Amino acid sequence: EDQVTQSPEALRLQEGESSSLNCSYTVSGLRGLFWYRQDPGKGPEFLFTLYSAGEEKEKERLKATLTKKESFLHITAPKPEDSATYLCAVQVGGATNKLIFGTGTLLAVQP
Amino acid sequence: NAGVTQTPKFQVLKTGQSMTLQCAQDMNHEYMSWYRQDPGMGLRLIHYSVGAGITDQGEVPNGYNVSRSTTEDFPLRLLSAAPSQTSVYFCASTLDRERPLHFGNGTRLTVT
């Protein structure tokens, strides 16, 4: 069964304290992996797409990486405005051709 | 360019009532979809459309109807609301299914 799991469920960091969020997946045929940021009361906002193992994407304090089994979202020297829920989603190819979302990681960055 | 616009933002229904959640996009996207978001669960696909006049079921379609008469609009209808449909509903659009989704800001629905 295709599955996407995010960990941890919640993470509290001090401002400037770097860390990583994990998205592990078991799917039959990865077409792409997406990272989104969701602020309270808002819809998810697209951050990155990764297509193949070894690929990396960066944007400000965020860097996303991809292996054959998981993706990491590295947050370097976070600021309070980075506080949000981070969602990953896996596009599964083949006959199913579906997008599976993880349950998200709630990140709180304390000043 | 407003992106994806959803109305209303909040709605309370009694069991058995019907209503329509509105979704409009101004990006000329062919693909539109409806998701529900519940605590402890990932976003789940309700219905989707790959273009005007074409709709299909997603993972959790029961209790919901959709239609797509124009490229811009994709309303979601609840014919007889049930407490199990209490959720936050998101509409999303994109050029095609394998590109990133653009989400609206959601409708929070409570069914009592």
Image (cartoon, helix red, strand yellow):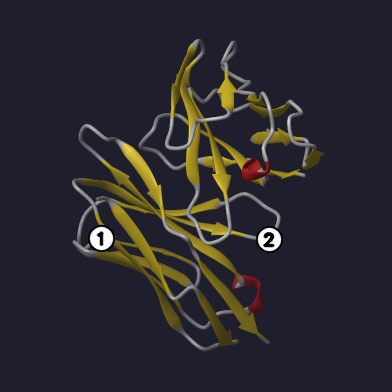
Q: Earlier in the sequence, mark 1 or mark 2?
A: 2
Task: Check the image and report above or below for B30 versus A110.
Answer: above
Residue A55, disc: 1
Pointer 1 and pointer 2 on the same chain: yes
Question: In the image, is B81 to the left or to the right of A94?
Answer: right
Question: In the image, is B97 to the left or to the right of A42?
Answer: left
Q: Chain of mark 1?
A: A
| Residue B89, image x, y percentages | 63, 42
Write down the quadrant of residue A94 in the picture.
top left
| Residue B1, image x, y percentages | 68, 33
Instruction: Please state which of residues A16 and B41 is positioned toward the viewer in this rendering.
Output: B41
Residue on which the image places disc 2: A40
Local packing at callout 1 (Cα closer than 10 Å; few below 14, some 14-19, many 20+) is: few
Badge 2 element: loop
| Residue A68, image x, y percentages | 18, 61
Residue B88 appears anywhere in the view: no
Question: In the image, is B82 to the left or to the right of A5?
Answer: right
| Residue A100, image x, y percentages | 38, 48
Write down the quadrant of residue A67 in the picture.
bottom left
